């Protein structure tokens, strides 16, 4: 905690705390699932819920692709 009592934390776990000069109107969502991680940053006029939905959609796509890669053999003989 700083001398003025401001500890720079946020109540919303989806929105990371940052430097005091950081634009807090830009929504950002970080997701991690085992070995996959996704970061989606919107524009200042995007809603956090829309950015969160995009991050979930992207994570779902990556999980599906990872599942297919595990099931199928690599054409280059790497798996």
Image (cartoon, grey):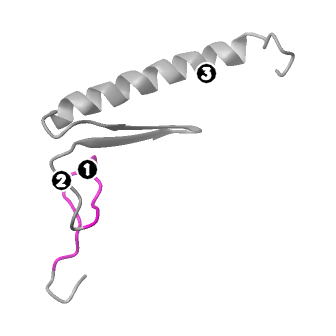
Instruction: Compare marks 2 and 3 and give the one earlier in the sequence.
Output: 2
Q: Number of callouts in the render?
A: 3
Q: Nearer the viewer, residue 64 or 39?
A: 39
Secondary-structure class at tag 2: loop
Q: Identify the residue at horizontal 21%, vertical 65% (top origin).
A: 21
Q: Which residue is mark 3?
A: 66
Q: Which residue is mark 1?
A: 15
Location of residue 4 in the rendering, given as x and y in whole percent from the top left corner? 14, 86
Number of residues whose C-alpha sits closer than 10 Å to that of mark 2, classed few (under 14), some (14–19) or many (20 or more): some
Marks 3 and 1: in contact by CB < 8 Å?
no
Q: Which residue is mark 2?
A: 24
- Residue 73 vertical placement versus 40 (above, below): above
Q: Is residue 76 left or right of residue 65?
A: right
Q: Is residue 47 left or right of residue 29?
A: left
Magenta-tinted stretch: 6-19
Marks 1 and 2: in contact by CB < 8 Å?
yes
Instruction: Compare marks 2 and 1 and give the one earlier in the sequence.
Output: 1
Q: Identify the residue at horizontal 15%, vertical 34% (top origin).
A: 47
């Amino acid at each position: 905690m700083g001398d003025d009592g401001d500890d720079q934390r946020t109540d919303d776990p989806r929105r990371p705390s940052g430097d005091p000069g950081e634009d807090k109107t830009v929504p950002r969502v970080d997701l991690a699932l085992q070995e996959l991680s996704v970061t989606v940053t919107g524009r200042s006029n995007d809603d956090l819920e829309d950015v969160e939905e995009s991050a979930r959609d992207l994570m779902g796509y990556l999980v599906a692709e990872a599942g297919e890669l595990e099931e199928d053999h690599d054409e280059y003989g790497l798996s």
